[in-house]
Image (cartoon, rainbow, N blue to C red):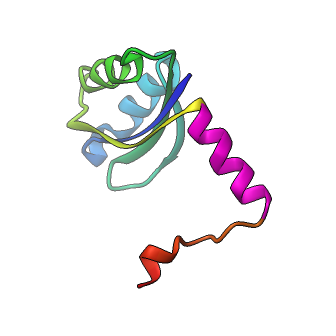
Amino acid sequence: MNIAGIVVRTVPEHLDVVMEALETDGLSEVHFHDATGKIIVTVEGGGDGEEVTKMREIMSLPYVISAELAYSYTEDELDLARDKLARGGDAVPERLNS
């Protein structure tokens, strides 16, 4: 399974309409939105680009200006990241501190 985070943008006037569409379309899970029209969602896919297909479907929703991929994890990568956090791994990778 793959998990992808997507930033969806709309204009503030249509935020409620887009939020409702995202919450009922079955394509994604909404996690955050703000008054400027930025919405953060995640989608799950079984591989073979399923999450990209879902992102394209989100982009075709009425009043959606854009949908941009923010991150993508495979199930194995996600499990490794969770294990590292559970062990108390560094919150900020060293390469970002330099």
- Between 9 and 92, the residue placed more toward the observer is 92
With 24 as the anchor, is 89 left or right in this view? right
Q: Which residues are drawn in magenta?
A: 76-87
Q: Position of residue 2 (x, y in %)?
A: 51, 27
With 25 as the anchor, is 89 left or right in this view? right
Q: Position of residue 88 (x, y in %)?
A: 76, 66
Furthest residue toward right: 87
**Total tally of numbered discs in the picture:** 0
- The answer to whether residue 78 is magenta is yes
Majority secondary structure of the magenta segment? helix
Q: Where does the C terminus fall, quadrant-wise? A: bottom left
Residue at 44%, 74% in the rendered image: 95
- Between 32 and 98, the residue placed more toward the observer is 98
Q: Indicate the quadrant where residue 84 lies.
A: bottom right
Q: Position of residue 79 (x, y in %)?
A: 67, 40
Relative to 20, is 46 above or below?
Answer: above
Q: Position of residue 11 (x, y in %)?
A: 24, 45
Q: Indicate the quadrant where residue 49 lies.
A: top left
- Between 29 and 96, the residue placed more toward the observer is 96
